[in-house]
Amino acid sequence: MAATFGYSGNTLLTVQEMYAADAAAIDVGIDGITLMSNAGRSIAEAIVARWSPRQTVVLCGPGNNGGDGFVVARLLTENGWNVRLISLVALEKFTGDARHHAELWAGEIEQPESGIGDAELVIDALFGAGLTREVDGVARELLEAAEGRDIVAVDVPSGVHGDTGQVLGYAPQAALTVTFFRRKSGHLLLPGRVRCGEVLVTDIGTPLTVLDGIDPKQAENGPELWVQALHWPQPMDHKYFRGHALVVGGPVLTGAARMSAKAAQRAGAGAVTLAAPGDALTVYKVTLESIMVAPFRDTSSLQDIVETPKVSAALIGPGAGLVTATRERACMILRTGKPTVVDADAISIFEGAPELLFDSVKGSVVLTPHEGEFARLFPDLQGGRVFRARAAAVRSNCVILLKGYDTTIAAPDGRVAINTNAPADLATAGAGDVLSGIIVALLSQGIPAFEAACAGAWIHAESAAMFGPGLIPEDITAGLPAVLRKLKAFPL
């Protein structure tokens, strides 16, 4: 697993890890001037491949991003483009590799006061992913003036933080962002992901071996990370070998648990049981045909069901209700040590007392909060999604699946995956219940919690994307077989 995180094209680097990668490349004999030259060349080639020659202005900042901009300006000019270059600082202010390439520029270095003019294409080489202050002053004025034109961003649109995707004051909307060697989390997280437009990762000569000493822990979620962990039925398998998932139903909002149970069944669990409180037993029995329904009276009788040897994973939360019994039942299930998904009401009921939940964890657990539920368990955690999800995973000793358009999955050991295949259509009531059902099915088959959460998020989103507009939760469940067929044929 660690090797996949380190060497896959899915790997994401932090800003500091990218600096370390550049330094390691230089240490093995690839000088910084060459790396910058290769970076600028890759940007120029991407531009030429997408646009015909037109009035172009390159905006250069005072650091290495500015140096890349000088390379782009020179190469486009050599290709017959009409290029102006505006720099925030005078030539003598540049140092190192950026100074070298700035001195190769034969054209005029204009001051910011010159403005964008009639440029149709703007190259944003002002600030890179490591920017920590807000974009303001003349830099912001130039970027605001560029809005509405085609913008190509070097590394990230200026103002987008490379680790968090957060906008520091202002960031332009790029048509294309060209980055190098590996992407950063900010390319995938909102709002930076939207600001980046198309993201192109180019090879500038950094050898893969530089990752040996970095050991990246972030990746874009995709089958490469977990497809080998999936279980497919074998000729000698029986239904319980394929996993027995238990879904705990609620007394009033019965539809949530029913959607979870049906999703668990479609996602591959060999058997699914829905534990039904007595006052809702008839509803569950009448509406669930091939899913077993087991009645319970109280937490003690539910425990008898959970501890049945054939039950291999449990889900509690969908439609459970914000009542004391939900808290008691969640703690009881967690204390059994069986792999568990905790969702919805079973998260919110611990607001103000999250330690009760965390102290009950005895086995593999996946918590699946949306932002509001996350804040109820971890009100003190602020900052970017990766930081918050990772810190929450360590504190709770659970896998955290922080739901959203940029769903972020974090494990207590520091691994983080960011999901990118979800359509906006998933913002519909009940979609989360289907997701938790998919994950409990995977847990029931013995798949480790982090891999089950990552696979569940991707499969759920892929099914939704394949359906498209008009999506309702049942459509996600109905689309699971097609996604599973695709994964079964995925090259290992």
Image (spheres, rainbow, N blue to C red):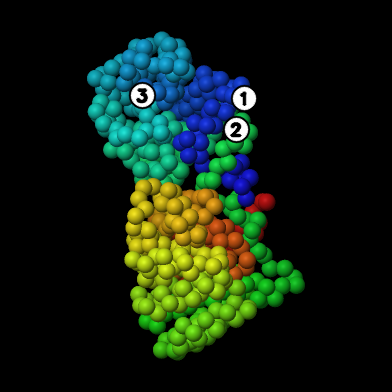
Contact (Cβ within 8 Å) of mark 2 with mark 1: yes
Q: Position of residue 398 (x, y in %)?
A: 50, 61
Q: Give the spatial CA distance, label 3 vs label 1.
A: 28 Å
Asked whether residue 80 is in view, the answer is no
**Which of disc 1 and disc 3 is earlier in sequence?**
1
Q: Say which quarter of the image contains residue 273.
A: bottom right
Residue at disc 2, secondary structure: helix
Residue located 63% across and 79% down the image: 309
Residue 165 sits above or below residue 270 on the image? above
Q: What residue do we see at 47% from left, 35% from top?
A: 16
Q: Which mark is residue 61?
A: 3
Between 97 and 361, the residue placed more toward the observer is 361
| Mark in front: 3 vs 1 | 1
Give me the residue at 50% from left, 86% from top: 301
Quarter residue 114 falls in? top left
x, y percentage for residue 229? 64, 58
For residue 365, above or below residue 394: below
Q: Are discs 3 and 2 less than 8 Å apart at CB? A: no
For disc 3, the neighbor class at 10 Å (few under 14, some 14 to 19, many from 20) is many
Q: Which residue is mark 1?
A: 28
Observer able to see residue 62: yes
> Is tag 3's residue or tag 2's residue first in the polypeptide sequence?
3
Marks 2 and 1, how far apart at CA: 9 Å
Q: Secondary structure at mark 3?
A: loop
The quadrant holding residue 197 is top left
Marker disc for residue 210: 2
**Kind of residue at disc 1:** Val
Query: Label 3 sits on what residue type?
Result: Gly
